[in-house]
Structures are given as structure tokens and as C-alpha cells.
Amino acid sequence: MYDMKALYEAENVVDACRLRLEHPEAQIVAGGTDVLVQMREGKRAGKALISIQGLPELKGIRLDENEAIRIGSGTTFSHLTRDPIIRKYMNVLGEAVDMVGGPQIRNAATIGGNTCNGVTSADSASTLFAWDAVIELTGANGVRLVPIQSFYLKAGVVDLHPDEIETAVLVSKESYDRTAGFYIKYAMRNAMDIATTGCSVNCRLSPDKKTFERVRIAYGVAGPIPMRVPSAEAAANGKPVAMETVDAFAKAVLEDIHPRDSWRASKAFRQHIAVEMARRCLVESVKRCGGEL
Amino acid sequence: MAQYKLVKCTINGKPVEKMIDVRASLTDMLRNDFRLTSVKKGCEVGECGACNVLIDGEAVNSCLYLAAWAEGKDILTLEGLMGPDGEISDIQKAFMDETAVQCGFCTPGFIMTATEILNSGIEYSDDELRKQLSGHLCRCTGYQNIFRAVKKTMLRRLGKFEEAEQVR
């Protein structure tokens, strides 16, 4: 038995927004793999829950009318990894979320929960930052679109209004077109572990594969919220596809990131692996774009 | 004040309905209301996999799943693998043959994940199989035997009997 005050099960998105206003103190629960653990551990004990678990309208992935990838917030990680649209256009996201927890967790945990937690170590977060994802929020007065960089406010806090739930994660065609990326999760173990640092890089090469048209990089656990690294991007954009560029790109990472000392790893070690991860991620991204180094 | 909900679902192929306390996890419901004690209470925070069951064919830790969410779902526990005359399934037999059972606490959870793997009909590589099985803890450290039992059964179901015999 959970130490739960009440359970309000939303019948659909509109009902969820109504329940949010009716019970402002209640916590939203989707997959349950974080919220129910926190309830068990006492952090959220005695709270009421608004359940949006299993709402069919929040599930699934499709291309919308602007050819943007639309990922329903209730889509589980394992469905994301297997989805043909993700595999074709944004494989790195499927790979990143395939590193969360273990298989049973990935069958339950949702992309919406991963983003609404506002946790810097979320495996989907760095990739969504690096691909300029947009969060779709639905409230009593309609839909609001927020770029993911502005959605994360501070550690554990996201820009979610009292009447809203997150309904989708969007990635525009401009963002995924001719683009390939790679994600590295550095953790102590291969399963059931939280990232010490996570790095996601993607690039688009010129048609002759000689020049970096656009390089984007983001980290999880390099600061209190996931972050982009503009200095590194500037060091690679418009530059020739060569190891010198990759090295300059990786070194520039340290101008922007501010990892901290924690029991998981020291600041010095995190800085060291951050540079190496950036380098390896870009090398792999170039390969996936059909380029040569 | 206690809050209740009538849940209708299918458990091991049988349609059932039960009035449940909304605070109950699916583990609580399966163990207490249906006496399906293969569903173990281990860590209760989704780390050990001992409470794993199949929900609509997908392996889920039932400790992190509310009983209220079972509405309309098709749930399979280890007990559901039993044949019409009480016989055990091939994967259970393989666990016995390979000595993949020591204390037995992790076994039902492992076997249900193995069931999802086997039902997919996919031939996984060794690394993929290990990854598929990584959501379970066995503190008797019998992983190699468990891995072998799953791999042999996977190969046998794909008709590769000779290859299965080569697995060490």
C-alpha cells in the first residue's frame, strides 16, 4: 500500500486540466517510476495523485502537418526506441532513452515524466536540448509551446502552469533534417544507474561532407539543469570536417560547463570526461552523417 | 478516508473483477487478493525486478504500478505459464535443467522477462540478451546459469536445437 491521500484518475486531457485546478496540491503521475518511488521513500508520502497514466491521446509518435516529429508525452521509452519515425529521423533519442533504468522501467516510464521532473540527469534531456525540442503544454485555456531550454527553470522545477499538463514533445523538420547525432551516458554501471554525465551531439554536414553546417551539443549533469554549449558549437560551425575542428570543439566545452563535486564523481573528473565525451560524440555523429575524419 | 475502485481485468487468461483500495500496488493486489505469490515483494522501488509481471505482453515491475491502472489490462504472472494438466513451461524446465535457481526469490521475475523475450520471436545476440535481463537482481549470483537457460530456450523455440546444445 502506498501512503496516498487520494487518487484522481483523469479521463482525458481536458479532465486532467480540470483536476489540476480542482486539486492544486496533487502531484501528476504518468509512468509512476519516479513519483511512486518518491512516495514510497517518504518524499511525497501522504500526497494526492492525479493520474494521466495510459491516456491513449498522450501516446504515440507521428509527423504533424508541418512534418515535425510529435512525441506524445505518455509514450514509454521502450515504444520510443522501437518507433520507426524515431529510428529514421532521430535515432539518437531512442538510443538515449534505451539507457534509462532497466527494461521493466523503460516499459513504464514516459518521456513526459522524464522532462517534467526537471532533473539534469534525465537521459532524454540532453538530446532534446541538443535538438531544440519544443514542449507542448495543454491547459484550461488551450495550448502553449515552450522551447525546452526555457521549460527547465532550475533543478527540479519546470515551467508548468497550475492548470497544465505536458501533452507532447515536438522536434521541427528544420532541426532533424539531414542531421544525425550520438549520445554517451557515463555511469558507474550499464543498467539501473543514473548518469554521472550525459553528452548528446548532432551535426549536419554540407552536401559535399567537407564542412560542418551546424553542430549542436548539450550536456546533462554539467550544471543544475541540462545545458547547451555555445562556445563549442561556435568552434565547429562553418569549419572543415577534420580532427582539428573536433579537438577545438571538445576543448571549448570547458568554457561553458560547470560540473560540481558530488559523491558520484569529482568536478575535475567530470570536466575530463566531458571533453572526451564531446570528442567521441562528434566523431560518431560525423560518421552517421556519412562524413570522414 | 479510504477510497475504493472496482477493477476489471484479465489475470492469467481469466476475466476477474475486484474492489481494490486505490492505495494498493499491483503487487499488493496480485498477492493479497488473488494469492499469486510468485509475485515477490523485494525492494518495492523498481530496482530488483522480483515483482515483474507481463501487462499486455510487456514486462513491468508491479510494485511501481497502481492496482487501479490494471483496469482493462491483460496480466500474466508465473502461475499463468502452467499448462492445462499442471505441466511447467519450457522456460521453467530450462531454469531447472541449468540450475538457474538457487534461493528462487528472483526466479519468477526473471522468467516473466524471459517470457517477453521469447514471445518476441527475435533471436537476440548475447549482449542484447544480457541487456534484456539487466532489470533483475539475483543475490545468489546465478546470472550465468540464468542467461544460459534463457538463451537455450530462445534457440529451441527458433528450432535451433543443435545450437542450443552447444551453449555453455
Image (cartoon, helix red, strand yellow):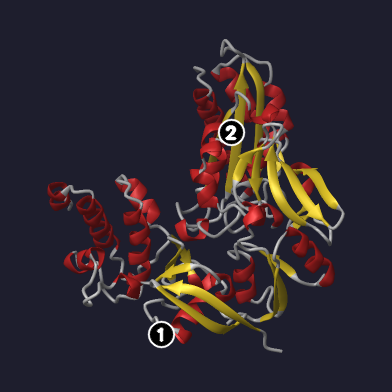
Residue farthest to the right, as pictured: A141
**Closer-to-camera residue (B155/B75):** B75
Residue type at mark 1 is: Arg
Residue type at mark 2 is: Ala
Q: Mark 2 — residue?
A: A278
Q: Mark 1 — residue?
A: B35
**Closer-to-camera residue (A23/B140):** A23
* Rendered location of residue B149, percent (x, y): 23, 60
Q: Is residue B25 visible?
A: no
Labelled disc at residue A288: none
* Rendered location of residue A180, percent (x, y): 57, 29
Q: Is residue A162 left or right of residue B124?
A: right
Q: Quadrant of residue B107?
A: bottom left
**Closer-to-camera residue (A43/A91):** A91
Chain letter of the residue carrying label 1:
B
* Rendered location of residue B164, percent (x, y): 17, 51
Q: Quadrant of residue A201?
A: top right
Provide the secondary structure element on which disc 2 rests. Answer: helix
Q: Residues within 10 Å of mark 2 (few under 14, many from 20)?
A: many
**Distance CA(mark 2)–CA(mark 1):** 52 Å
Quadrant (top left/top right/bottom left/bottom right) for the N terminus of chain A: bottom right
Q: Residue at x 65, y 57 (%)?
A: A113
Please state which of the two labelled residues, at mark 2 or mark 1, is closer to the viewer.
Answer: 1
